[in-house]
Image: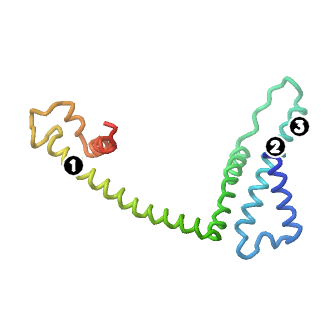
Amino acid sequence: AEHILLAVFSFEIAVRLQRCGLRFFYQRGDWFWNWLDAIVVFGAVVDQWVLPCVVYLQALAIGPGKEQEAPGGKLGQVITMLRMARLLRILRLVRLVKHMPPLYTLILGIVEAMEGMFWVLILCILVLYAFSLMGVNLIGPRGLILNDEVNPDVASIFNGVMQSMFVLFVAMNGEF
């Protein structure tokens, strides 16, 4: 299935290049997507079709039964990056969102909700910090409330601010 899709994408790039020539790469408004498509398809062609042929030809040249080192190194890193660039094609869907008003409204609502969630996160951090600071100063190893009568296990929980913030966070989430 991947080879079929690669053939379709390769055909699409070839037709667009035939139709537009080199203007394909610097058309106003679409140049980024055109370059992205060309790079992704080129990388996929190298990865799916050219490299297996090179490995096969190397195996024929070396002969059967002889060890050969695995293809990789810098070329392997480049191919891995090109594989990851395929995921960027998903970004093309972002352009479609603006043409669907209900979906666009939903996404705007989610973004606005995330802004509110940011402030909830800040508030939680501040509250956890304040209570962990109180816990360290009142209950910790040199606490003001229990002085020498503190249980060593409790004192170890409120040993430092960051550790007590974590413990309070776990307790806040009901995992304690």
User: Mark 1 highlights which residue?
Assistant: 133
x, y percent for residue 19: 88, 70
Q: Residues within 10 Å of mark 3 (few under 14, many from 20)?
A: few
Q: Indicate which label's residue lies in the foreground, 2 or 1.
A: 1
Left or right of 65 in this view: 168: left
Q: Which residue is mark 2?
A: 51
Q: Residues within 10 Å of mark 1 (few under 14, many from 20)?
A: some
Within 10 angstroms of label 2, few (less than 14), some, or many (20 or more) residues? some
Element type at mark 3:
helix
Separation of marks 1 and 3 at Cα, in angstroms: 67 Å
Mark 1 and 3 residues: CB-CB less than 8 Å, in contact?
no
Q: Report x, y in % for residue 18.
A: 89, 67
Name the N-terminal-most of marks 1 and 3: 3
Q: Amino acid at mark 3?
A: Leu
Q: Which residue is mark 3?
A: 57
State the residue at coordinates (58%, 67%).
Answer: 102
Is 161 displayed left or right of 34 in the figure?
left
- The image quadrant that residue 147 belongs to is top left
Q: CA distance from mark 2 to mark 1?
A: 59 Å
